[in-house]
Amino acid sequence: MRWSPAVALLGPRQVGKTTLARKIAAGFPGALYLDLESSEDRARFAQPRTFLRNNRERLLVLDEIQNLPDVFAEMRGEIDEARTPGRFLILGSASIELLRQSAESLAGRLAMVDMAPLLAPEFCHQFQDLQTLWLRGGFPGSTLAPDEVAAWGWREAFIRNFLTRDLPLLGVGAAPDTMHRFWRMLAHLHGQLFNASAIAASLGVSGPTVSRYLDGLGGSLMLRRLEPYHANLGKRLVKSPKIYVRDSGLLHHLLGIREVNDLIGHPGAGASWEGFAIEQIMGHLPEGATTSFYRTAAGAELDLVVEAGRKKLGFEIKFSAAPKVTKGFWQACEDVDVDKAYIVAPVRERYPFAEKVEVLSVLDLPEVLKSFLP
């Protein structure tokens, strides 16, 4: 907001974008908040050029901007006439559509910020809070619910509304029941290599249709597609991506996991912890950092490789208070030539594991990433 004339705050519905935007607007005298799902607020744009010119001295917060796509072109002209920082704060849940529109109309005029669900440092005041965040996920309505029944009910309603309301905005065009089945399939494949043809056969649809469904969930920030690390190493590398349900609370709902005891004893607990830790890492990476996973046919593997500038970090994620690694971990660190490697585990305190290798808690990630990466 200090240097860009327009800022886009992107994230899934109910993640807290509007709350944050109103807090920001409170610091700008005369700021005007408009909800473009409201017909009354949309009516103000009957003469968009005049409206924008008359409010040139105010911060305009435009929520759910995908409901008024024509405003992008008008914003471009208005910014070019009066290019000052902090003129527009735009919010959107249908991120694919918003990105496409803004890229075409506001190239060079717009900064984009992805807003993730709550991260551990934003919620966890003691070690036990980490368990709550992992079980319920980071959407505030679920995380801050008074009990597990309320948290479960919030996620139930969120999934239903997402399937019936949000996905159609992305043009996915699948029946809600079909997408629910697809999403549950992906939950059972969480952290595994993605095989489009196998899922297509189970759903009774084509491979391209499965790819379209996957793009819809990925574009709405419900799903993470982690690509394999590629380098000319002379190794037989895995080429398929790995798929993760980004929010652990939604993952657990799709798997039918209601309580902590159910989670700890579930066969998917390790994969769930892996996805949870990956999202925590992603939430603290600097802009421009790239991520991938490394796996060879011979068994060398790193769950996450982070590259930022000239630095390269490797992460192995273990659901154990006394984590151990295999020979494949050491081979992967050598193949990728990481500067340092970390084992992320449910431990209370970080400690050295070997030369250039540490065991970390999720709560240590912000400090580690801030100090090591540019």
Image (tube, rainbow, N blue to C red):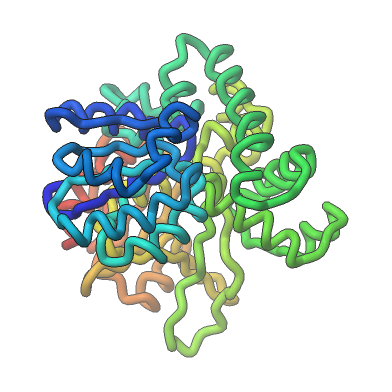
Q: Where's the C terminus, which quadrant?
A: bottom left
Up-down relation of residue 118 to residue 345 (above or below): above
The quadrant holding residue 367 is top left
Name the one closer to the observer, 244 or 42: 42
Q: Find residue 303 and report its horizontal and vertical position in percent.
A: 46, 59
The quadrant holding residue 265 is top right
Up-down relation of residue 193 to residue 310 (above or below): above
Name the one closer to the observer, 227 or 336: 227
The answer to whether residue 115 of the structure is visible from this angle is no
Up-down relation of residue 116 to residue 97 (above or below): above
Q: Residue at x 41, y 25 (%)?
A: 140
Side of 48 relative to 22 (left or right): right
Q: Find residue 253 and report its horizontal and vertical position in percent.
A: 62, 30
Name the one closer to the observer, 88 or 175: 88
The answer to whether residue 147 of the structure is visible from this angle is yes
Q: Residue at x 46, y 9 (%)?
A: 146
Q: Residue at x 26, y 66 (%)?
A: 108
The quadrant holding residue 74 is bottom left
Side of 197 relative to 363 (left or right): right
Q: Residue at x 58, y 25 (%)?
A: 155
Q: Find residue 103 and report its horizontal and vertical position in percent.
A: 39, 63
Q: Residue lying farthest right?
A: 204
Q: Find residue 195 and report its horizontal and vertical position in percent.
A: 71, 64
